[in-house]
Amino acid sequence: MGAVFSMYDACWPPKAKWSVNNIPDLSGKTIIVTGGNSGIGKETVKALLAKNAKVYIASHNQARVDAAIKELEEATSNKAFFIELNLASLNSVKAAAGAFQKLESKLDVLIINAGVMIPDPQALTDEGYDLQFGVNVVGGWFISVLIFVSRALGHCCFTRLLIPQLLAAGSSRIITLSSHGHILAKGINWETIRDGPARQKTESLDLYNQSKFANVVVACEFARRYGDKGIVSTSLHPGLIITNLGRTMSPFKVKIASYLSYNSTRGALTTLYAATAPETLNTYLSWKPHASTSDIELGAKLWAWLEDETKDIK
């Protein structure tokens, strides 16, 4: 019952006391937003550009990004830049990190915004991972480490690749969009990460919640490993927001969700707060996260697994 009330509070929070007007001038700051061409990501990019940040939108669809860049430039008078990134392919993740590293010597903020929710049950990444875990967790970790340090599956992979640039900034932030749905996960069922009998028996929503649980675990482990080196790692619940993340849901479910959710502009506020507010710390922003997400042994185990899974990506 506690989980039900917690979900209710997280989905319908009180009115925000913080707004985009509180964002300081971001001149000289370099920021990457994955999936920044639509939904929460697009609203995030818009607010950052309005405050003079240099923003890169990392996404796999250049046509859509180009259209978003044009629209955002008209709205803010500042131009974002495109980096090709497919989080369902670790080779694409590494190429994206390499492309960014040729353009910039430092990265101030990496916002892991792109994600997948309840896709076709048969959908897998190029490497054979469950699509939701591969995109939402592995890819983001890998690029973060590649840019901020130097090595890790989708988001995790991307984060890992960017660690050198994050460290070079002196004081950097990794912002990971999780979900309050992570509290419904029963930890990580390692047998469901790749396709097999266990994964086939697991509901897509449960796999999604598991990936969001792992997001928080990775964010906590990043804070433990790199907090003293100037990297602030934060995970967050953006609220119940209707975006194209639910593009694979049935029309009926989308219609119901539209009555219960907020728009992307409001959904971007927590991300923007985590990315720019001076008081943001290494934490999970929203209500109290699942207690197991801060488990030291689990964090170390997941990190070691990610490193092992990506060690042969050349």
Image (cartoon, rainbow, N blue to C red):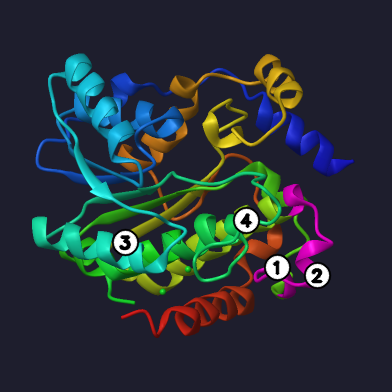
Question: Quick check: 46 left or right of 179?
Answer: left
Q: Quadrant of residue 243?
A: top right
Q: Residue at x 75, y 30 (%)?
A: 8
Q: Dot 4, how many residues are within 10 Å of its Cα: few (below 14), some (14-19), or many (20+)?
A: some
Q: What mark, if any, has residue 188 been given in the picture?
A: 1
What residue range appears in magenta? Answer: 191-206
Specify the amino acid type for callout 3.
Ile
Q: In the rendering, at what x and y percent does residue 213 appear? A: 64, 57
The kind of secondary structure element at disc 3 is strand
- Label 2 – label 4 distance at C-alpha: 15 Å
Specify the amino acid type for callout 4.
Ala
Q: Which residue is mark 2?
A: 198
Asked if the residue at tag 2 contacts the one at tag 1, i.e. Cβ–Cβ closer than 8 Å, the answer is no
Specify the amino acid type for callout 2.
Ala
- Label 2 – label 3 distance at C-alpha: 36 Å
Q: Quadrant of the C terminus?
A: bottom left
* Residue 206 higher or lower than 6, as above or below: below
Question: Can residue 285 be seen here?
Answer: yes
- Looking at the picture, tell me which residue is in the foreground, 227 or 199: 199
Mark 2 vs mark 3: in front: 2
